[in-house]
Amino acid sequence: MIKSISLTLFLVVFISACRIDGNDTVGQEELNFSTTDDSEIFFKNVRQLYYDLEEIQAANLNVFRIKERSVSEDYPVINLAIVWNWLKDEAYILIEPNEILIEEDPLVVHWRSPVSGEEGIIEYSQGNTMAQLTFANELYNGILNNYTFEIISNGLSEPLLKANKDREAFRKTMADYFRLTRTFDQR
């Protein structure tokens, strides 16, 4: 009896300590690119299975794209890739809009909170790694806050990240990125 209680308690503690998904918003000041040996091992052994891998050996880069991402060209899609520079122990987020959005610069996303009615704009002009990470983080935080999104495409406002599949692929990629860069662990 005591063994089963001890085992149950151990499993509860172990499972909560190994929480893979983050459900906390991330502030701008928490963003970083550094990876550690243990976070890289965790990603490679546990999370890499859920990603398509593109190796760019000449640049010492591995690019990971979540398998459940949308490849549709029927509506606006913004996918993410995790770019791991294994030589520098750094990881980056790469914004990958589909063909519908490829010519849009800047990307202008209108968000709205269904609870408070508050609304605003998230804008991304093609830029460096921090600009891409900041834009992706703002969308990630909006997903966690259950915001609705619309994007300007060819002069028209269209829904963005409306399908649960698209939102989850985006959210999971960002959560994996934050786990890889130990953003969640630095709190």
Image: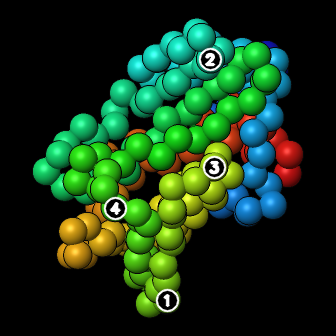
Q: Earlier in the sequence, mark 2 or mark 1?
A: 2
Does any portion of residue 4 appear in the rendered image? no
At 51% from the left edge and 63% from the top edge, which residue is drawn?
124
Q: Secondary structure at mark 1?
A: loop
Query: What is the C-alpha distance between the residues marked 4 and 3?
Result: 17 Å
Percent x, y of residue 18 = 70, 30
Q: Mark 1 or 3, which is nearer the eye?
A: 3
Q: Are marks 1 and 3 in contact (CB under 8 Å)?
A: no
Percent x, y of residue 77 = 30, 51
Query: What is the C-alpha distance between the residues marked 1 and 3?
Result: 29 Å
**On screen, 153 above or below 48?**
below
Mark number displayed over residue 118: 1
Q: Which residue is mark 3?
A: 128
Q: Secondary structure at mark 4?
A: loop
Q: Which residue is mark 2?
A: 59
Q: Are marks 2 and 1 in contact (CB under 8 Å)?
A: no
Q: Earlier in the sequence, mark 2 or mark 3?
A: 2
Find residue 91 and report its image quarter: top right
Furthest-left residue in view? 74
Q: Are marks 2 and 3 in contact (CB under 8 Å)?
A: no
- Looking at the rendered structure, the kind of residue marked 3 is Asn
